[in-house]
Image: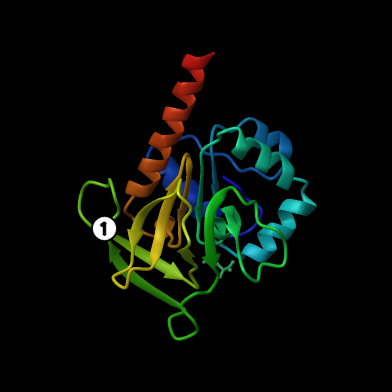
Amino acid sequence: MLALQGDFREHIDALRAIGATASEVRTAEQLAVVDALILPGGESTTIARLLLAFELMEPLRARLRAGMPAWGTCAGAILLARRVPGLDRPPIGVLDVTVDRNAFGRQLDSFEAELAVAGMAGGPLRAVFIRAPVIREPGPGVTVLARLDDGRIVACREGRVLATSFHPELTDDRRMHEAFVALARDAVAARGSAA
Ligand code: GLN
């Protein structure tokens, strides 16, 4: 769990609630030993600055390019994107999408919506959006996982990189965390069988 800023504690609680082992990552040494990484919601400009200050940006890019599973929620999704208009530092840039920050304006600072998530059993997911970004211009390798009723993309995946505009760590529905842990376990198993 990337733990520089934002709501990483809620994610850790969610992961532990489903029996996964979770640890905080603030240094390159801690990053080197995790199997997968969640990037939390928070303030993308602050997290981008801290990634540089903690000398995590390049090690993180290297691990993501080597296939480490990652999931960004809200600010985390912004950081994973290749194109982020108005972000004052380069994003990590491993997900072939454009992400517009604060895409819902002031009146809709925060809201909830029921989302049908592709591949997720058990009916719609109640999603919490807080000063949320919107995903657009998905590249050819990107699978769209969820859209709002108006068609705007709020969840997608490219390879082992997952992005959601919303905050599954703030509700009791653990299906997104379960899906990500399953993805991480598959990646570990694939690594094991390749060795
Ligand atoms: N608006 C924030 C940003 O641009 C993201 C908000 C969030 O993570 N809840 O970083």
Q: Is residue 157 above or below residue 132?
A: above
x and y, in percent, of residue 51 in the image? 72, 52
- In the displayed orientation, state which residue is furthest to the bottom: 107
Left/right of residue 117 with respect to residue 106 in the rendered view = left
Which x, y percent locates residue 16?
44, 41
For image coordinates 69% across by 63% down, the residue present is 46
Please tell me which residue lies in front, 155 or 170: 155
Q: Tell me what residue is drawn at x 52 percent, y 57 percent.
A: 97
Disc 1: which residue: 116
Tell me where residue 35 sits by quadrant.
top right
Name the residue rendered at 65%, 51% in the picture.
Answer: 92
* Type of amino acid under label 1: Ala
- Left or right: residue 68 versus residue 121 is right
Q: Give the residue displayed 61% in from the left and 43% down from the top.
A: 24
Counting other residues with Cα less than 10 Å from the Cα at mark 1, is it few (<14), some (14-19), or many (20 or more)?
Answer: some
**Ligand 1 lies in quarter:** bottom right
Q: Nearer the viewer, residue 180 or 23?
A: 180
In which quadrant of the rendered view does residue 26 lie? top right
